[in-house]
Image (cartoon, rainbow, N blue to C red):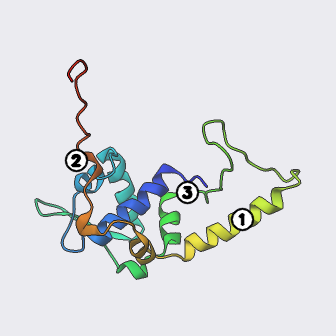
Amino acid sequence: MITSKRLGYGVCVLYELAVRKDGYHSARDVAEGYRVPEAFVRKILLDLRRAGLVTAQKGRTGGYRLAHAPKAIKLGQLIKALEPVTPNLVYGRQRGGGFATGEECPVAPFWQGLETVFTQALAESTLADVVNQSRVPAKKRTPAAKVAAPRARKKGRA
């Protein structure tokens, strides 16, 4: 299953705001943990604000925070906020163009059934579900951009 970058990072943005409960958080802070351009995260946050999922405050202590509790935010709302057209599943490898079934394809009903189930499950899931199923607790998570790579040993030394 492949989703758009906007939808994938939209879930990450909401997750970050959910686990960073207190106060407002800048787009830069949210973006740095995922190695995504701040401008891209700002566009996502703007759409989320327009949809009423986050609130914004200007100024030195400003930024963004969730407008509702995580259990009150359905991922279906996120899809509507970030995707003008309902996303379709892409089967196969994305770089090769993926495999998209047409109505004439004999296995199209199978893939369309899976797509319906997936889309319904995503729409009914809440942000609280995402937070509860995350692998790394919020307090222990280190932003990916700040993790140092291990040093390589120089050749020729024993």
| Residue 51 position within the rendered picture, expressed as x and y whole percent measured from the top left | 42, 68
Name the outermost residue toward the top: 156
| Mark 3 vs mark 1, CA separation in Å | 22 Å
First along the sequence among labels 3 and 1:
3
The amino acid pointed to by label 2 is Lys
Name the outermost residue toward the front: 158
Which residue in the protein does label 3 denote?
84
User: Is 124 placed above or below 48 here?
Assistant: below
Q: Which residue is drawn at the image coordinates 41% and 77% (left, top)?
A: 128
Q: How crowded is mark 2: few (under 14 residues within 10 Å), some or many (20 or more)?
A: few
**Closer-to-camera residue (17/114):** 114
| Residue 112 position within the rendered picture, expressed as x and y whole percent measured from the top left | 75, 62
The amino acid pointed to by label 1 is Leu
Q: How crowded is mark 1: few (under 14 residues within 10 Å), some or many (20 or more)?
A: few
Q: Residue 146 carries which label?
A: 2
First along the sequence among labels 2 and 3:
3
Q: Are marks 1 and 2 in contact (CB under 8 Å)?
A: no
Let me know if residue 55 appears in the view.
Answer: no
Q: Which residue is drawn at the image coordinates 13% and 60% (left, top)?
A: 59
Looking at the rendered structure, the secondary structure element under dot 2 is helix
| Residue 17 position within the rendered picture, expressed as x and y whole percent measured from the top left | 30, 67
Figure quadrant of residue 95:
top right
The amino acid pointed to by label 3 is Pro
Looking at the rendered structure, the secondary structure element under dot 1 is helix
Q: Residue 114 carries which label?
A: 1
Q: Do the residues labelled 3 and 1 touch (CB within 8 Å)?
A: no
| Mark 2 vs mark 3, CA separation in Å | 34 Å
**Mark 1 or mark 2: which is in front?**
2
Quadrant for the C terminus, please.
top left
Quadrant for the N terminus, please.
bottom right
Looking at the rendered structure, the secondary structure element under dot 3 is loop
